[in-house]
Image: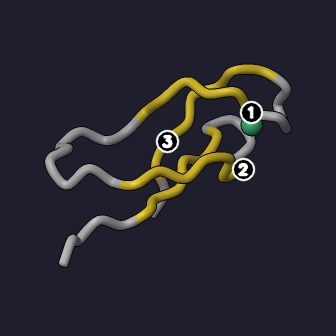
Amino acid sequence: MSSKRKIALACSVCGSRNYTITENPNRTERLEVKKFCKYCNKHTLHRETK
Ligand SMILES: [Zn+2]
C-alpha cells in the first residue's frame, strides 16, 4: 500500500486552509507555495500544515 497522505496548505497571512495536496514521499523541504487566497483576495504564501 502507498503511504501517501493529504496535507493542507494554509495561507501564511490569515491561516485559512485553502488547498490540499497529496504529499510526495520523496520531498524533503517544507512546502511554501504562492497561491491565491480568496479571504485575503490576493496571492499569498501558503505553507503545509500538520
Ligand atoms: Zn489568506
Which of the pair 43/25 is nearer the observer?
Answer: 25
**Horizontal and vertical percent for residue 11?**
64, 40
Residue at point 82%, 31% (across, down): 40
40 up-or-down from 3: above or below: above
- Judge the density around disc 1: few (<14), some (14-19), many (≥20) Cα neighbours within 10 Å: many
Q: Tell whether label 2 touches label 1 (CB within 8 Å).
A: yes
User: In the image, ligand 1 is in what quadrant?
Assistant: top right
The kind of secondary structure element at disc 3 is: strand
In the rendered structure, the answer to whether residue 9 lies left or right of residue 39 reads: left
Disc 1 or 2, which lies upstream in sequence?
2
In which quadrant is the N terminus drawn?
bottom left
CB at mark 1 closer than 8 A to ligand 1?
Answer: yes
Q: What residue sits right under mark 3 in the picture?
A: 47
Q: Amino acid at mark 3?
A: Arg
Which of the pair 32/5 is nearer the observer?
Answer: 5
Q: Amino acid at mark 2?
A: Ser
Give the alpha-carbon distance from disc 1 to disc 2, as whole Å: 8 Å
In which quadrant is the C terminus drawn?
bottom left
**Horizontal and vertical percent for residue 33?**
48, 29
Q: Amino acid at mark 1?
A: Cys
- Judge the density around disc 3: few (<14), some (14-19), many (≥20) Cα neighbours within 10 Å: many
In the rendered structure, the answer to whether residue 19 lies left or right of residue 27 reads: right
